[in-house]
Image (cartoon, helix red, strand yellow):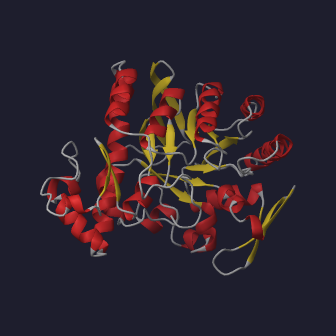
Amino acid sequence: MNQSTERVSFELLRTDGDARRGRLSTPHGTIETPVFMPVGTQGSVKSLTTSQLAALGPGIILNNTYHLMLRPGVELLEQMGGVHKFIGWDRAILTDSGGFQIYSLAEIRKIREEGVEFRSHIDGSKHFLTPEKAVDLQVRMGVDIAMAFDECPAGGLPRAEVERSMELTHRWAARSLTMRRGRTSLFGIVQGGIHHDLRKRSVEALGELPFDGYAIGGLSVGEPKEAMLDTLRYTAPLLPRDRARYLMGVGTPEDLLDGVAAGVDMFDCVMPTRNARNGTLFTSQGKVQIRNARYKADDGPLDPACSCPTCSTVSRAYLRHLYVADEIAALVYNTIHNVSFYLDLMGQIRDSIESDSFGAFLRTFLERTSRSNTPGDTPVEREPFRE
C-alpha cells in the first residue's frame, strides 16, 4: 500500500448525479471512495483479529477517542509507538472525537463553554475534555484523521436548544483547529438537527475554517427516519466539493445507498458487527436470521453471491448450529461475512458510479432487499458503549 507523508487529500474522480467516486490519500495509504469504515471502537473490530480484518481488505477503520483515552490511555499508546503499532494495523485510522459518547452520558456529564466534565462509565472517575484536549489526544495517538470536538444534540430538542448547541460546536471547531499538527488531518462536524436553515448556516460557518474534510453529525439520534433522510439529502450537496464528506454513524445498507446518492464519500456504523453478534446476517437477497429453525439442515452457503471465507467454507446449517450452541466461532464467522458484505457493497457502488449506472444499481438493490427491520436489528445505529 502506498505511503504518504502529508495530511489527507481528496480527489474527485467521477460523478453520477450527486453520487461521487473519489480517492482519499492518507499517510497510511490511498482509499477508494465511497468507503465504509469498520468500527473498532476500542482498537478492535469485535470478534476479529487484526489479521482477519486485514484479509477482508478495508483501507481504513474507525477507533474512538473516548474509549481509548480511558483504556488503555494515551500515555501507553504513545509509549507503544502509537495506535497503529499498538493494534498491528498498517492502514488508515480515523478517530471519533468522543463527542457522541459524551452526549450519551447525559446523567453524568456537564457541558459548558470550556468543554465537558464527565465521569467514566468504567469506574466513575472524573474527566474534563476540551476541544483542544480532544484533538491533542487524537494527534498523540498518531491517527490519520481526527474529528473536531462537537456537541451532539439529541433528536427532538426544541429548535432554540439545537441552535445553541450548533453555535457551541462552531466555537469548539475553531478551537479544535489550533491543535492540528503533524500528519494528522482534522475534519469539522456539521450540526443543526433536522432544520435546513441551521444546517446551511453550519456548513457555511465550518466551510470558512480550513478543515481537511467535513462530516455530517447529529443524525440517527432519535429523529424519525424520513427526517434523517431529508436532512441528509439537503445537507450533503452543500458541503465543499473538493473535500471528503463523511456521514457519521448511519449505516443500514439502504442508508449507505441513500448517503452515496446524496453525495457522501465516507461511512461508519456498528450495525454489521453488532448484528453479526445478534445472528442477523446481511445477504444479497436480504437479511437472514441464522437462528431460525428453517436453516437447521440447510447445506447451502449463507449467500451464494458472496465469496467471503464464511460463504465459501461453511453452510447455513453449520452457522445456525454454532449460533444456537453459543459457540464463539459463530461470532467470528458472522462478523467476517457482515463486514465483507458491507465492503463488497461499497465496491459495487464504486463500480456503478464509474459506469454511470448507480441509479440502476440502487433500484435493483432495493428490489432484492427490504427496508423493514427484522428481529435482531436496532432502530438507533450508534450505541455508545457496547461496540
Where residue 307 sits in the image (x, y, percent)?
20, 47
* Of 133 and 78, the residue lying toward us: 133
Where residue 236 sits in the image (x, y, percent)?
60, 30
Would you say 385 lies left or right of 128 here?
left
Would residue 1 be visible to someone looking at this image? no
The single residue placed furthest to the front in the displayed view is 293
For the point 65% across and 44% down, the residue is 223
Would you say 353 lies left or right of 250 here?
left
* Of 76 and 336, the residue lying toward us: 336
Where residue 157 sits in the image (x, y, percent)?
78, 47
Where residue 147 sits in the image (x, y, percent)?
64, 49
Whether 107 is drawn above or below 167: the answer is below
For the point 34% across and 59% down, the residue is 335
Q: How many marks?
A: 0
Would residue 55 be visible to someone looking at this image? yes
For the point 29% across and 60% down, the residue is 290
* Of 86 and 359, the residue lying toward us: 359
